[in-house]
Image (tube, rainbow, N blue to C red):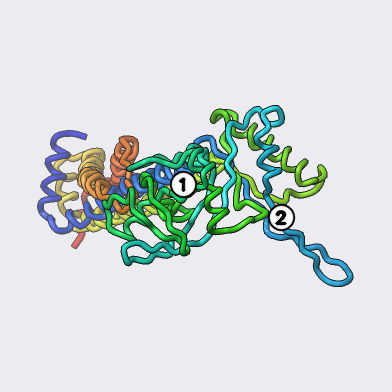
Amino acid sequence: MTIDSIRVALRGMLANRMRSLLTMLGILIGTAAVILLVAVGTGISNLVQHQIETLGSNAVYIFPQQSRGAQDRGGTNARRIRLTQNDVDALSDKTRAPDILAVAPTVQTNATAVADGATYALQTFIGATPIYAQIRNATMEIGRTFDETDESNHAKVAVIGQTVVEHLWSKGFNPVGQQVTFNGVRFRIIGMLEKKGSSGIGDQDDVVIAPLSTVKDSMVGNIDTYTLIAIQAASRTQTDAAQAEAVRILRQTHKLGPGQPLDFQIFNQASLLNTGKAAALVFSLLLAAVAAISLFVGGIGVMNIMLVTVTERTREIGIRKALGAQKSDILSQFLVEAVLLALMGGGMGVAVGVGLAQLHIGPLRPVVSMGSIVVSFVVSALVGVFFGAYPANRAAKLTPIEALRYE
């Protein structure tokens, strides 16, 4: 690439400004799409990871399976699957489960909240022991959570999520000290949970949590099964071991033989995190592939325009060759023009892509990586070389006689 080649290429681009701008626009869109879609994919991955981490610290969750049926001569006999206090006591035994730090049985019910004339049907009303807040990473924005004294005294107190606050009062309202009626039972709000946001499991702020003893007394009655049992492993590295211990213990308490399927569901935060990361990676690769296609289409536009340029300037090529221009001179002239179009389009595409990535869509925060910028810019240059090589080579192969005779 010589100065003369660059000067001739720029003169050719300026002679056809609109055509050059439209060609650069194709590369611009492709480059910007690569940067923006990769940034969106990274942002989605980070969002999924954050949402899963809010489920709890080293947490393992156990749910009862749906009722199972066994066919006999008379029809279907159903066996109700339960998670009982016997299961909780067994899981809490440190000699049987040394990797389990804490166990929190919970019950969940639907509830309609009424306060100051406003009514709201909230997503989840949870009754739990005080340790549940630690397992779930439920920290307070305002006020406090309930403690063992509230649990033992069957106190009618509760902590409330911010979505419920917004529906009953308004965003930013301090609900601490307010009296709220849930399914006809009056509770005093003692804390508001920090905002966690929405995820694939629903709105984590559309929740109210109260002492388990109070919920049993006032709302769900003397039930014989828990909705779920939350477990906290002693450390992040012990999560899988804690889950294995829970499976082994519940097999014993549920009297399940070695070959029998589990009658409960169990998952931990780490497995969810790995699954979420894998899904986000596939989605990011899909977005990158779509962006690469748009960049490829931009390259086709470069080739098309360069072929038109070669056709229009055939006589010029003949004159230059007649005056002593070498094949390499003609080749570099058109190749440099194609590369310049691609580079200028790529540079503008980088600016547009980085600028658009600064826009936030709800909780999604696109993350621009330096790697995607470098790769997209380099690829745009390679697109110019690849799609400009054929038209440039075609121009270089023209003989002076056939070029001068071209009409």
Cα distance, mark 2 to mark 1? 34 Å
Looking at the image, which residue is at 34% across and 45% down?
39
Q: Is residue 395 visible?
A: no
Q: Residues within 10 Å of mark 2 (few under 14, many from 20)?
A: some
Residue 270, by quadrant, is top right
Looking at the image, which residue is at 71% across and 55% down?
81
Helix, strand or loop status at disc 1: helix
**Residue topped by disc 1:** 280
Judged by depth in the image, the label closer to the viewer, 2 or 1, is 2
Q: Residue furthest bottom?
A: 74
Amino acid type of the residue tagged 2 in the rendering: Ile
Say whether residue 374 is left or right of residue 18: right
Say whether residue 276 is left or right of residue 105: left
Q: Residues within 10 Å of mark 1 (few under 14, many from 20)?
A: many
**Residue topped by disc 2:** 81
Amino acid type of the residue tagged 1 in the rendering: Ala
Q: Residue furthest front?
A: 153
Of the numbered discs 2 and 1, the one sitting upstream in the chain is 2
- Which numbered dot is residue 164? none
Helix, strand or loop status at disc 2: loop
Asked if disc 2 and disc 1 are in contact, CB closer than 8 Å, the reply is: no
Up the image or down, 353 lies above or below 311; here it is: above
